[in-house]
Every structure is written in structure tokens, then in C-alpha cells.
Amino acid sequence: MHDGIWKRGYRLFITLIVCCWLKSGCTPPPVQQHPPVDNTRVFNVAFDEVWAHMLSAVTTGEETLSFVDKNTGIMTFQKNIPVKQLDTYAFDDSGMLMSNATANVVVRIIAEQPNRTRIVMQTKITATGKDVLDVFLSRQRQVVLESKGWLEREYFDRITEHLKASPAHAP
């Protein structure tokens, strides 16, 4: 009689352990708050010149332009992020093994005054990866990661370098 109780208890215990283990792969981690990204720069240059330099900064061959409209001041593009550099560019709290990542960037260029232009960049990084349960189920999932601001800074630095090299702004 006691053997039957122990066997049922043991089976129940093992079942609970397996269920908890499987559930741990299904439960998303808690959302963490990340510091705000510096995604805005103001240039004391006319809109047309900033637009031209931003366009040349995002057409280096690493990016794929998806929308460009000078009248609204909006351009959007995608850039592949090497998985080895994902920690540099994004906060990854997913715990997943990533296989690829793409930065999706929306750029808004605003003429505040005749010689004062603001650029605002919004970046989301979409990554594809697997967690423990996904490995067993032979599937991959996409997650959206928050930017750390490094990608935005790279483009702002490119624009600054383009402006410095511009004949109108050369010393």
C-alpha cells in the first residue's frame, strides 16, 4: 500500500518538474526599463543640405531604403546587424539564441528655421532566434529589441563628417 502512494507521489513530482521546466521556456521575461536613447540632433545648417547629407549617409550599400519623401522630411531604411554585434546595438533581454537581426529606422528631418534643422531617428531592431523550447519544436521566433543608441550615433557622426567635408562648411 505504501509503495503505491510513493509511486504516485514520485510520478506527480516528476510531472510537476517537467511541466515547470517546459513552462519556463514559454514565459517571457519581465519587461525591463532601459535608459532613453539620444536620438535627436540639431544642425545649424539648411534643411536641403542636411537632407542631402543624411541621404548620402544612409546609401553606403549597408542599408536598404524603403521610403524617401523630402516634402515630409521622412526616410526609412533597414540595416542588417551582425549577430556578433547585436549586444552593441540592442538591449537583448530575451535569453534567445539569435540567428539574424535587422535595424528598422525611421528618420524625420525637420526645418526649424532657415539655417537650423533637427533630425530625429526612431530605431527598432527585429531579431530572429530560438529559446530552449523552440529548439525542441524546431521553430524560430522574431522579437523586437530596443536600441541602445549606437546606430543612431553612427549616422549622426556620418552626417557631421559629411558637413565638415562640405565646401560650404570647410574652415
Image (spheres, rainbow, N blue to C red):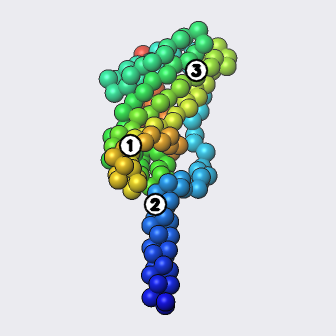
* Closer mark to the observer between disc 3 and disc 1: 1
Location of mark 1 (residue): 140
* Side (left or right) of 165 relative to 2: left
Please, is residue 49 above or below residue 105 in the view?
A: above
Mark 3 belongs to which amino acid? Ile
Residue occupying the point 59% across, 33% down: 40
**Mark 2 or mark 1, earlier in chain:** 2
* Side (left or right) of 73 relative to 22: right
Location of mark 3 (residue): 109
For the residues marked 2 and 1, what is the alpha-carbon distance in whole angstroms?
17 Å
Q: Is residue 52 visible?
A: yes
Few, some or many residues within 10 Å of mark 2 (<14, 14–19, 20+): few
Few, some or many residues within 10 Å of mark 3 (<14, 14–19, 20+): many
Residue occupying the point 67% across, 17% down: 113
The one of 5 and 148 positioned closer to us in this rendering: 5
Mark 3 and mark 1 residues within 8 Å of each other at the beta carbon: no
- SS for callout 3: strand
Residue 50 rendering spot, x and y as whole percentages: 52, 19
Location of mark 2 (residue): 22
* Closer mark to the observer between disc 2 and disc 1: 2
Residue occupying the point 47% across, 38% down: 125
- SS for callout 2: helix
Few, some or many residues within 10 Å of mark 1 (<14, 14–19, 20+): some
Please, is residue 81 above or below residue 20 in the view?
A: above
For the residues marked 3 and 2, what is the alpha-carbon distance in whole angstroms?
47 Å
